[in-house]
Image: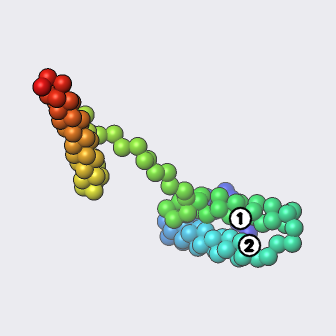
C-alpha cells in the first residue's frame, strides 16, 4: 500500500490518476448511502443497539456529504425574500399571492365602505 505522501504526489503528477481517484470517492459515497439504508432497515433489539445504528448512519451521512457534496450535502434554503425595489414591495410575490392579496384588500375596502355608509345613514336619521 502506498503512503499518503505518495498518493498525493501521484495525484499532482498524473491527472488521470487524480480523476480516477475522484470517481472512486464518488462511488464510495454511493456505497455508504446504500449501507445507511441497510442499517436503517435492520431490526434492532434494544435502545443501545438503536443508538449504535443511529451513530453508524450519522457517520456515513457525514462522510457522504464530504465525499460527494453535490449530491449528499444538506442544502440551506434562504426563505426570507427582500424586495429588490422598496417602492414596489409586491413585485416579489407570486401571481397567486398577488391575487389573494388583492381579494383581501377588496374585502377590507368593502367593509370600510359599509361602515362609512352606516355612519352616514345614522347621521341622516338623527338630523331628520
Q: Image height check: is 42 above or below 86?
A: below
- Residue drawn at x 56%, y 69% is 26
Label ID, residue 39 = 2
Does any portion of residue 126 appear in the rendered image? yes
| Image height of 49 relative to 95, above or below | below
Left or right position of 33 against 48: left
Counting other residues with Cα less than 10 Å from the Cα at mark 2, is it few (<14), some (14-19), or many (20 or more)? some
Name the outermost residue toward the top: 127
How far apart in space, not on screen, are marks 2 and 1 (Cα)?
7 Å
120 and 63: which is toward the camera: 120
Cβ–Cβ under 8 Å for marks 2 and 1: yes
Q: Nearer the viewer, residue 100 or 68?
A: 100
Whichever of labels 2 and 1 marks the residue nearer the N terminus, that label is 2
Mark number displayed over residue 57? 1
x and y percent of residue 47 in the render? 85, 63
Q: Quadrant of the N terminus?
A: bottom right
Query: Quick one: SS at disc 2?
Result: helix
Give the residue at x 87% y 72%: 45
- Crowding around mark 1 (Cα neighbors within 10 Å: few <14, some 14 to 19, many 20+) is many
User: Where's residue 54, x and y in %?
Assistant: 75, 62
Tell me the SS state at disc 1.
Answer: helix
Residue 9 visible from this viewpoint = no
Which residue is drawn at the image coordinates 78% and 66% (left, top)?
53
Amino acid at each position: 500500500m502506498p503512503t499518503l505522501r505518495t498518493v498525493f504526489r501521484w495525484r499532482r503528477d498524473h491527472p488521470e490518476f487524480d480523476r480516477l481517484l475522484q470517481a472512486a470517492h464518488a462511488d464510495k459515497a454511493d456505497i455508504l448511502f446504500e449501507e445507511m439504508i441497510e442499517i436503517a432497515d435492520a431490526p434492532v433489539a434494544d435502545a443501545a443497539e438503536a443508538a449504535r445504528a443511529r451513530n453508524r448512519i450519522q457517520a456515513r451521512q457525514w462522510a457522504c456529504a464530504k465525499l460527494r457534496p453535490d449530491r449528499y450535502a444538506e442544502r440551506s434554503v434562504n426563505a426570507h425574500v427582500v424586495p429588490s425595489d422598496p417602492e414596489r414591495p409586491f413585485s416579489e410575490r407570486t401571481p397567486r399571492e398577488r391575487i389573494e392579496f388583492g381579494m383581501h384588500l377588496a374585502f377590507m375596502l368593502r367593509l370600510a365602505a359599509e361602515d362609512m355608509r352606516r355612519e352616514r345613514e345614522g347621521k341622516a336619521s338623527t338630523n331628520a
